[in-house]
Image: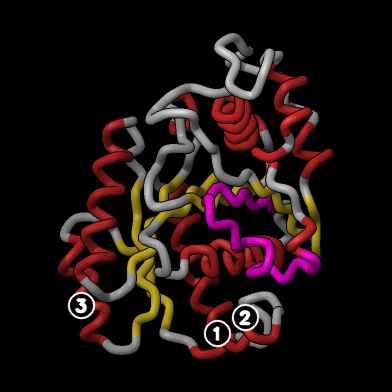
Amino acid sequence: MKIAISGKGGVGKTTFVATLAKVFKENGKKVITIDADPVSNLAVTLGFKNVSEIIPISQMKDLIKERTGASDEYGKFFKLNPTVSDLPDKLSLEQDGIKLMVLGAIKRGGSGCACPESAFLRTLLSHLIVQRDEVVLVDMEAGVEHLGRATVKAVDALIVIVEPGSKSIQTAFQIKKLADDIGLKSIYVVGNKVSSEEHKALIQKGLDGIPVLGFISYNDKILESDIKGIAAFSENSTLLEEVRQIKNKVEETVKTK
């Protein structure tokens, strides 16, 4: 199962990714999570300690130079398909049976330019999605920029996290358009921070045609976990049960595609 998760900043997608990883793991699955959001918060949301010591892969300049053969940081000549198959086992962190890789942001020298970091991270992500046999969960920014055309065929689902509100719903449509442009058709929504039936109706009506997999209630314990520095799903049976139901729906939906 390979799932990409996207959504407007602040809607709770990283909390969803972490909790989804937890429920897959409790079902005996091997799980690797990928933090592909430039604002990297997945480690702390999963409850990893000493997160300030984690070095994003995009900042491993010597490794990138070695694998791509780049002559300098912004060299024009480098391998577009560097060897990366050994790196998930070498570079992933692990806690409570859940693996984590932090990709980090790509700093480009100019708008849209190619760079060794971009080629390296795209190849690594493609390897994880296409060739690995774990459950792979990718926490992305509000878009699909990390997914190349060759990668999308292996993605079982793109889940967009939406909260009640027009901005979040509009972002979902923007993400859907970007996904359509690269041929990614399996797009679904999870409603988050829902506190009433009216909120559910607003999301379902506003999305008009994008399937909704389920809803997650507004939950004060998520903020409490952040204050305590523990995993978002710790001491939160409601969140875990709601995400279990969504995970089951994802599996049912993918099987019947």
| Alpha-carbon span between mark 1 and mark 2 | 5 Å
Apparent side of residue 129 relative to residue 94 in the rendered image (left or right) = left
Residue at image location 21% in from the left, 85% down from the top: 198
Q: Earlier in the sequence, mark 3 or mark 2?
A: 3
Q: Quadrant of residue 10?
A: bottom left
Residue 88, given in percent of the width and then of the height, sits at: 75, 38
User: What amino acid type is highlighted by mark number 3?
Assistant: Ala
Q: Is residue 226 magenta?
A: no
Q: Which residue is mark 1?
A: 223
The tag on residue 226 is 2
Apparent side of residue 4 relative to residue 137 in the rendered image (left or right) = left
Residue at image location 62% in from the left, 76% down from the top: 232
Residue at image location 40% in from the left, 63% down from the top: 9
Q: Is residue 78 above or below residue 127?
A: above
Residue 46, given in percent of the width and then of the height, sits at: 68, 67
Query: For the C terminus, which image quadrant?
Result: top left
Tell which residue pokes out farthest to the right in this image: 90
Q: Quadrant of residue 169?
A: bottom left
Q: Earlier in the sequence, mark 3 or mark 1?
A: 3
Residue at image location 53% in from the left, 37% down from the top: 107
Relative to the observer, which residue lies in front, 255 or 85? Answer: 85
Q: Which residue is mark 3?
A: 201
